[in-house]
Image (spheres, rainbow, N blue to C red):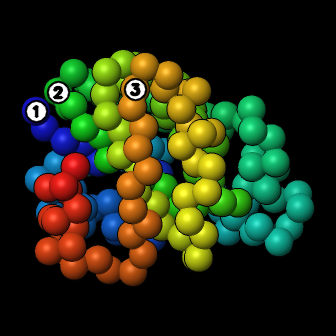
C-alpha cells in the first residue's frame, strides 16, 4: 500500500516539510486548502479577534476546506502535517478528518512548531476520525535531513 502525506500550511513552513517528507517517503502529496486562505492578519495570535485566535478558542470551529477527490482506499498510512496552534492542531485538521472516511487507517501526525510539543493534539483529533488510529509522530522543524526522515518513515 502507498503512503499519503496530507498537510495544511498557512505560511508555507509546513508545506516545505511536507513536500520533503513526501519525496523521501515516496508518498503521494495532498494539500488541505482552506476555502478562505489565511492572511497575515488572520494568523496574528496576538490579536484576540484574529481569525486563527477565534477558531482556536472555539473547539467546535470547523473552517471550510476546498473539497477534492481523495481516494483513501489506496493508502494504509496517512502522514498528516500541520503547524501547532495553541499547543494543538488547527481546527481545520478536524474539518479534514470529518470530510473523508478514515476507517481502518493509521494516521501519523507530524507538525511544525515555534516551540510547542503536540500537547493534547491526539485527544482533540481522535473524535473527528473515530474509526482510525491516530498516533503522535514528530515535530519536524527546520530542514530535516533525508536520512532522519527516511529512518522515521521506515520505523512506522
Callout 3: few (<14), some (14-19), or many (20+) C-alpha neighbours within 10 Å?
Answer: some
75, above or below 56, in the image: above
Q: Nearer the viewer, mark 3 or mark 2?
A: 3
Which sits earlier in the primary sequence, circle 3 or circle 2? 2
| Residue at mark 1 to residue at mark 2: CA–CA distance | 6 Å
Residue ID at (10%, 33%): 1
| Residue at mark 3 to residue at mark 2: CA–CA distance | 15 Å
Determine contact: label 1, label 2, CB under 8 Å.
Answer: yes
Q: Position of residue 70 (x, y in %)?
A: 30, 28
Total labels drawn: 3
- Judging by the rendered image, the residue that carries numbered circle 2 is 74
In terms of secondary structure, where does tag 3 sit?
A: loop
112, above or below 73, in the image: below
Q: Position of residue 95 (x, y in %)?
A: 57, 33
- Judging by the rendered image, the residue that carries numbered circle 3 is 132
In the picture, the disc for residue 1 is 1
Taking depth in this image into account, of 135 and 25 the one nearest to the observer is 135
Callout 1: few (<14), some (14-19), or many (20+) C-alpha neighbours within 10 Å?
Answer: few
Q: Is residue 7 left or right of residue 28?
A: right
Q: Is residue 39 left or right of residue 59?
A: left
In the picture, the disc for residue 79 is none
Residue ID at (34%, 68%): 16
Amino acid at each position: 500500500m502507498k503512503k499519503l502525506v496530507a498537510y495544511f500550511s498557512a505560511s508555507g513552513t509546513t508545506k516545505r516539510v511536507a513536500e520533503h517528507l513526501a519525496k523521501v517517503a515516496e508518498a503521494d502529496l495532498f494539500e488541505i486548502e482552506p476555502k478562505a486562505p489565511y492572511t497575515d492578519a488572520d494568523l496574528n495570535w496576538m490579536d484576540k479577534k484574529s481569525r486563527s485566535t477565534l477558531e482556536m478558542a472555539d473547539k467546535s470551529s470547523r473552517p471550510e476546506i476546498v473539497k477534492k477527490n481523495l481516494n483513501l482506499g489506496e493508502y494504509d498510512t496517512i502522514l498528516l502535517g500541520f503547524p501547532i496552534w495553541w499547543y494543538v492542531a488547527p481546527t481545520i485538521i478536524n474539518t479534514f478528518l470529518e470530510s473523508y472516511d478514515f476507517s481502518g487507517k493509521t494516521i501519523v501526525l507530524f507538525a511544525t512548531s515555534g516551540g510547542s510539543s503536540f500537547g493534547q493534539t491526539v485527544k482533540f483529533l481522535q473524535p473527528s476520525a473515530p474509526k482510525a488510529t491516530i498516533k503522535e509522530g514528530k515535530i519536524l522543524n527546520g530542514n530535516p535531513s533525508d536520512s532522519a526522515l527516511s529512518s522515521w518513515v521506515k520505523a512506522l
